Structures are given as structure tokens and as C-alpha cells.
Image (cartoon, grey):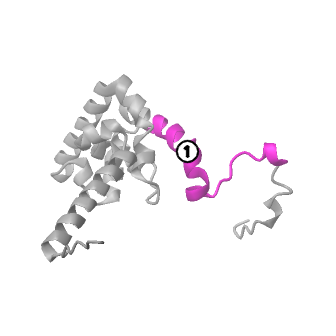
């Protein structure tokens, strides 16, 4: 004999289940996208992310690719980074009345960065990101179309180099 359970799915039950599912998936995705330190210090991560995205602006690249290379930097030079971000916020408040990350205009943020571009803080972040971002093989093909080294495959000449249409040459 088979028994069937008749459980009705009410609107309230549906919303409870989907809300729990959404919250769980958000927690899981956040934990896999941002490094552990960024989840522990979201304010610092957001400020540093804004700076990194202004130095090397690529809207399509995910935040984690900007934040991951900064992990060793924060472990070794945390005071420099915190002091540099505080100084940048101080300059932004003096010039625009709000913190650096809250400034909507990219031109205004760039002006502030030009003021500090020769300093140790800016150069440290820039040098860390240039290697950490552009030397990451996960971003080469999907974001820049770069296939990587061709030496192992016989070079570019026989592999599509001559197929390029470069209209600006």
C-alpha cells in the first residue's frame, strides 16, 4: 500500500524556501569570489578595490582578480596601505566633501590619483596590481583575447597571425 503525502506549497512557504536558497547562494558566491581578508574587512577591500579599478580600469574583470594579488601586499605592508587609503580619503574630503570611493566622477578620482602617483603607497599598489592582474592566465583569453605563449606551439606565423585584420596599421 502506498501513502501519498499531500503538502501544499503556500505563498509564505515558497518565499521562505526561496529566500533561504538565495541567501545561501549569495553567501557561497561571496565566499568563492573574494579572498578571505576581503570578506573579513569589506570596508578596506572596497576602498582598495576602487583604487585598483581606477589604476587599471577593466569593467568586465571580476573583483576577485583585483583583490587576490593584493593579499600578500596587505600581509606584508598593511600599515602603508591603510595610511595611504586614509590619506587618499582625506584629500578627497578636502577637495570634494566625501571619501575617495564615494566620488562618482572618474575624472575627479583620477585628479586625486595624479597628486599621489609618485608616492610609495600608489607605486606599491600599482606595481603589485600590474603583475598580479596581467600575469594571471585566467584573465588572458576571456578578457584580453591573449592565448598565451606561442613558442611551444610553433609560433604565431602559422597559427593565425597573418589572419589578423589590423585596420589602424
**Compared to 86, does 94 lie above or below?**
below
Q: Quadrant of residue 74?
A: top left
Q: Residue at x 79, y 59 (%)?
A: 161
Q: Residue 137 location, x and y as percent?
A: 59, 45
Q: Quadrant of residue 24?
A: bottom left
Q: Is residue 77 left or right of residue 133?
A: left
Q: Residue at x 19, y 75 (%)?
A: 9
Main SS class of the magenta portion in the image: helix
Q: Residue at x 19, y 40 (%)?
A: 90
Identify the secondary structure beneath mark 1.
helix
Which residues are drawn in magenta?
A: 126-154
Q: Residue furthest front?
A: 1
Front residue of 107/5: it is 5
Q: Which residue is mark 1?
A: 134
Looking at the image, how many numbered discs can be counted on the residues?
1
Residue 58 painted magenta = no
Q: Residue at x 37, y 40 (%)?
A: 35
Amino acid at each position: 500500500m502506498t501513502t501519498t503525502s499531500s503538502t501544499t506549497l503556500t505563498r509564505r512557504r515558497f518565499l521562505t524556501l526561496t529566500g533561504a536558497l538565495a541567501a545561501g547562494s549569495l553567501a557561497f558566491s561571496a565566499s568563492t569570489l573574494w579572498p578571505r581578508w576581503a570578506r573579513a574587512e569589506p570596508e578596506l577591500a572596497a576602498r582598495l578595490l576602487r583604487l585598483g579599478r581606477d589604476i587599471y580600469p577593466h569593467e568586465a574583470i571580476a573583483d576577485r582578480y583585483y583583490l587576490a594579488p593584493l593579499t600578500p601586499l596587505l600581509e606584508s605592508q598593511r600599515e602603508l596601505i591603510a595610511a595611504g587609503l586614509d590619506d587618499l580619503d582625506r584629500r578627497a574630503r578636502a577637495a570634494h566633501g566625501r571619501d575617495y570611493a564615494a566620488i562618482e566622477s572618474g575624472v575627479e578620482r583620477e585628479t586625486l590619483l595624479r597628486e599621489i602617483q609618485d608616492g610609495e603607497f600608489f607605486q606599491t599598489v600599482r606595481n603589485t596590481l600590474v603583475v598580479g592582474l596581467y600575469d594571471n592566465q585566467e584573465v588572458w583569453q576571456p578578457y584580453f583575447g591573449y592565448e598565451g605563449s606561442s613558442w611551444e606551439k610553433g609560433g604565431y606565423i602559422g597559427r593565425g597571425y597573418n589572419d589578423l585584420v589590423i585596420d589602424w596599421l
